[in-house]
Image: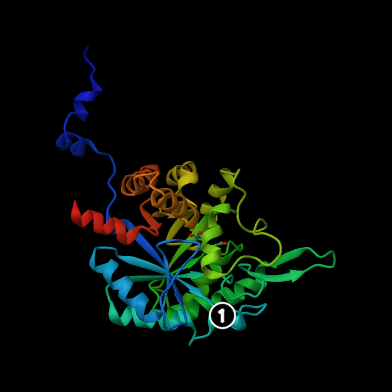
Amino acid sequence: MLQRPRRNRKSPAIRNLVREVSLCAKDLIYPLFVHEDAEDVAIASMPGCTRWSIEGLVKEAGEAHALGVPAVVIFPAVPEEKKNSTGDESYNPHGLIPRALKALKSAHPTLCVITDVALDPYNSDGHDGIVQVRSDGEVEILNDETLEVLCKQALSHAAAGADIVSPSDMMDGRVGALREALDAAGFADVSILSYTAKYASAYYGPFRGALDSAPKAGDKKTYQMDYANVREAIREVILDEDEGADMVMVKPAGAYLDIIAKLRENTMLPIAAYQVSGEYLMIKSAADAGWLDEKAIVLESLTAIKRAGADLILTYYAKQVAKWEREA
Ligand code: PBG
């Protein structure tokens, strides 16, 4: 036998030499939840995750950063009484996210802080855009009216020190609108990480529980993508590039590895992938029940996302992976 592929697998040293991709804490973005309360509260729908006070958030982000995680993305849990149909709280310069941003950036100047741009945490209808109920009772999400609010939201984040704003709303034209608004206000240095191919997915269920942000009526299928589609993701990446996105994202990640690979062939921009709350919960719940080896599954699932072509990964396991890396 001339060909014996097993020779390249015969020892850990050789396996490491021929390993094609590696997972590193420096590629990870840690999503964190923040609320107005002074207490840190465990999230029932996402065991192991917490709704942090601003103080708790600063501490948790600092620990992750010290372990080698370069970036966090922050999501607000907004009290019901601050929500309205136009999501005005989303651009309050003294709102939760601007205050959290300032606290994070002053405590950890080298930490990259990313904010989510979308209306769902602030909107009494629980949609990413402004809702209009049609005469037939159907829920319509207004695109162009929403863009104006998203721009104000992004500007409030930029003013408070965001390094990157990340539109997750899937409105048409939002990357171009944000780029123009940021540049006009003197924030040419603020980057845009676009949720380019964000699918209408049942994997977001636990996240909506974490923020109490589920849509009150209808679903998100008129703006998030149909999970049966591939070419549509390429169309979205072409548009986002044209509109000035700095990085693009595929979400969810694990069930969409083909989409990551396709985008890799179709863009030179860095690609992020989001291992979302449902992916996290499937691993966590099976591990907590003793049915799966948590560390092995997490490392395999994240490495697979990198192998598919992702440069960066958003994962609730970011801090844990950094810890494992230190121990290794
Ligand atoms: C909201 C947003 C969602 C997530 C990130 N930003 C939920 C949604 O679109 O309904 C999901 C993240 C996760 O499930 O971990 N714009």
Q: Residue furthest top?
A: 1
What type is the residue that disc 1 sits on? Pro
Q: Nearer the viewer, residue 142 or 323?
A: 323
Q: Position of residue 51 (x, y in %)?
A: 44, 72
* 248 vs 66: above or below: above
* 78 vs 280: above or below: below
202 vs 186, left or right, is: right
Residue 186 in view: no
* 180 vs 173: above or below: below
* 157 vs 292: above or below: below
Q: Position of residue 271 (x, y in %)?
A: 41, 53
Q: Residue furthest right?
A: 135
171 vs 23, left or right, is: right
Structural crowding at the residue carrying mark 1, measured as other residues with C-alpha within 10 Å and reported as few (<14), some (14–19) or many (≥20): some
Q: Position of residue 21 (x, y in %)?
A: 29, 43
Pointer 1: what residue?
A: 79
Q: Nearer the viewer, residue 321 or 183?
A: 321
The colour style of the image is rainbow
Q: Nearer the viewer, residue 314 or 49?
A: 49
Q: Nearer the viewer, residue 102 or 30?
A: 30
Identified at 18% across, 28% down, the residue is 10
Identified at 71% across, 65% down, the residue is 217
Q: Position of residue 170 (x, y in %)?
A: 58, 61
Identified at 49% across, 84% down, the residue is 95
